[in-house]
Amino acid sequence: MARYRVPEVAWAFAVGDLLAERVAAGDPAVVYFWTASKTLVLGMQDARLQGAKRAAARLYAEGVDVFVRSSGGRAVAIDEGVLNVTVVVPETGPFRSMDGSFAWMAEHVRSALKPLGLMVGIGEVRGSFCPGRYDLSVGGKKFAGLAQRRTRGAVQIQAFVLVEGTGAARAKVARSFYRFTFGERPIVRPEVMVALAELCPIDLLAAARIFQRAFVRALVDVPDGQRNAGGPLPEMRVRSVASGSALDVLKAMHLDLVVTERLKGQKARSAAALAE
Amino acid sequence: MEFPAGLKYSKEHEWVRVDGTKAYIGITDFAQDELGDIVYVELPEVGAELVAGESFGSVESVKTVSELYAPVSGKVVEVNGRLADEPELVNRAPYADGWMIVVEMRDPAELEALLDAEGYRAHVAE
């Protein structure tokens, strides 16, 4: 039986849950950036596919970590060139509904990229990995997707943004997982995925700066047009944390001990989901 | 929107039907409507100990995973196995075939902290 390392993404999701608890208790909203080494982050439905465990073991043998996340959607292939943005907000204003939360996030990703000359579309890109109504695309090719995790009093809205490298290379990782599984599963077409660096000169740090500026501003000053789902948004304090490693973020926030317990939960959940 | 009388409700949108010392638990019509099409339900195993107010599982719908919170404490004695292959039962019949777990209650007095149908109706109207 294959033995798995603890993927770095387990930390990232554990941090997200901890931040959500704190935001629900009245802490400021958080914009949290993270990256991880090559990992296929499965949705819960993927883990239930027949042959999922064998498929995960094959990817693992090829140097790809596999992790089952606790937010919505299907398999997402990430690596050091993918910027993950998690916005952690109280369940209020536009964030009271799932649709309102997705629409808010998608709109702010779109407007953040406008200065780069990118005309971003919002809507499902068929054949992309982890498809959904709020896929973000340029010229019909998807570069980012959204998911949510809702816990009592707080919402985590997660975006993966393909920044460096190519979209097709990541799509092939997701496709190879599905090829090793059986049953009804998504069809992934590498030609409909793209990375921002294929469209304009940009790197991970530049992208993080753009989104940090955009989301912090958006959370402090929610425009009137967004105040539609549940009345006005209460005044929100915002902080943002950016780092290449979830562990660095935790250490900076003196939370590394607290989150260790959450990490155990994340590991157990992922392992149980892939058990046959 | 249905709010059957005779059930107890939590502010986190779970319902409880009491049968002696057992509590049948599911999510409300309001909750399933808010969630949209449910594609996956994650539930505890029989024998798991639940604590009122803590998470006991999750549901996935429209690229969103929402946590479920136990309305009462106790041991899980039955799990609705049909939901593994037919999660849509929660949308179709949240108070009937879409039930989720049965708990042997540790402290039935916890029920007093829950809402009745009218109280829950007022809560979701807020």
Image (cartoon, coloured by chain):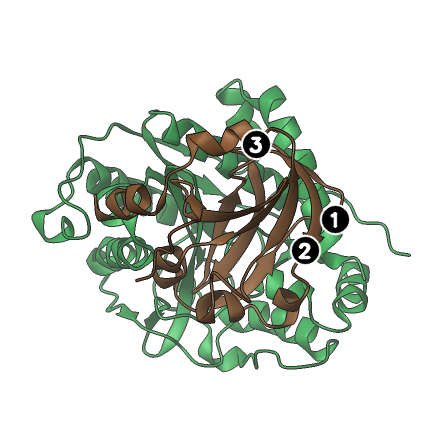
Chain colours: A green, B brown
Q: Nearer the viewer, residue A61 or A69?
A: A69
A261 relative to A34, above or below: above
Nearer-N-terminus badge (2/1): 1
Residue at figure coordinates x 29%, y 55% from the top left: A109
Q: Which mark is residue B46?
A: 1
- Residue type for callout 3: Pro
- Residue type for callout 1: Val
Q: Which mark is residue B79?
A: 2
Q: Are marks 2 and 3 on the same chain?
A: yes
Residue at figure coordinates x 57%, y 67% from the top left: A170
Residue tagged 3: B108
Q: Position of residue A37 (x, y in %)?
A: 63, 49
Q: Chain of mark 1?
A: B
Please tell me whether mark 3 sits on a helix, a strand or a loop.
Answer: helix
Residue A212 visible here:
yes
Nearer-N-terminus badge (3/1): 1
